[in-house]
Image: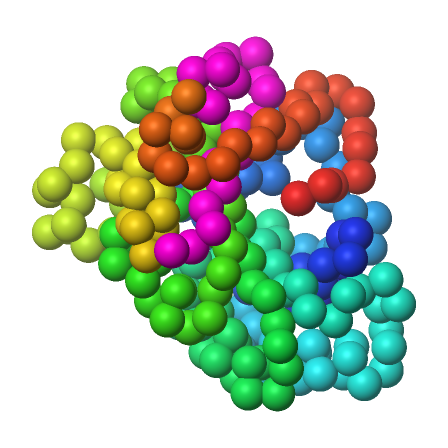
Amino acid sequence: CIVYLIGSSLYVALTNRSPGLSLISSRGPGFEFAKKFKRLRNDYEPSCEDVVKRISCALEEHEFPNWDKKSVVFAGAGDPLLKQDVLIKCCARLLLNGDFKFRVITSGLFSASVPSKLKDAGMQHITVGLNAHSAELYDRIMQPEYPLASVSAVEQEQYASAFDVALEFIRNSVAVGLETEITCVDNPLADLKKTEGLSVNLGATFRSRSYFPDSTAESKL
């Protein structure tokens, strides 16, 4: 499905693809997504027209009574910034006809220039699933496909690791004025205290997420 509800926010799925381990998979083998969520077909990624039409229908038909009609979060099974062109167009289109508040949940494994583009498009909040406090631990937990297809080869020459790419993305998110949150899953390898300290040093807020080794729970993205 393209849209689904968690709490009072409408979530938008743009892709199932991720540059490494997906943030959903990082929650553990026992993690179960929101009950009404269904993954996109692997052969389908919605266009801007698809998304805007779907949200417009949800508004007109009062499909989600608990939705506050303002909060829109780009998330889903994959990393929405792999479809950043569609995301940016969606924000611009939706703001023409409504007062929406946008958030995106991402790995942050993208060009350092992306945060400013998101800010210009009307994005207010960004959540980066960092899940580690060091490059070595990040590689073990998140298994990034490095070098990254989501960042140009020229830009990647500046960085020693995928972790460094994510850190620079976070720094730029803070610098351009996005409300930036870093999350870390409380898995057996993670050090929440050190990751929180890193988050504070980067100028971001911090939130831990539960790890599910074998039990199931509804998503609270």
Is residue 202 in the magenta section?
no
Near-viewer residue (9 or 151)? 9
Asked if residue 169 lies left or right of residue 183, the reply is left
Near-viewer residue (207 or 215)? 207
Q: Is residue 9 visible?
A: yes
Asked if residue 4 lies left or right of residue 53, the reply is right
x%, y% of residue 81? 43, 58
x%, y% of residue 154? 11, 51
The structure residue drawn at horizontal position 82% and vertical position 55%, both measured from the top left corner, is: 36
The structure residue drawn at horizontal position 55% and vertical position 87%, both measured from the top left corner, is: 96
Q: Is residue 100 above or below residue 136?
A: below
x%, y% of residue 137? 38, 18
Write down the quadrant of residue 165 in the picture: top left
Asked if residue 150 lies left or right of residue 69, the reply is left
The structure residue drawn at horizontal position 38% and vertical position 25%, both measured from the top left corner, is: 198
Is residue 189 in the magenta section?
yes
User: Which region of the structure is painted magenta?
Assistant: 177-196
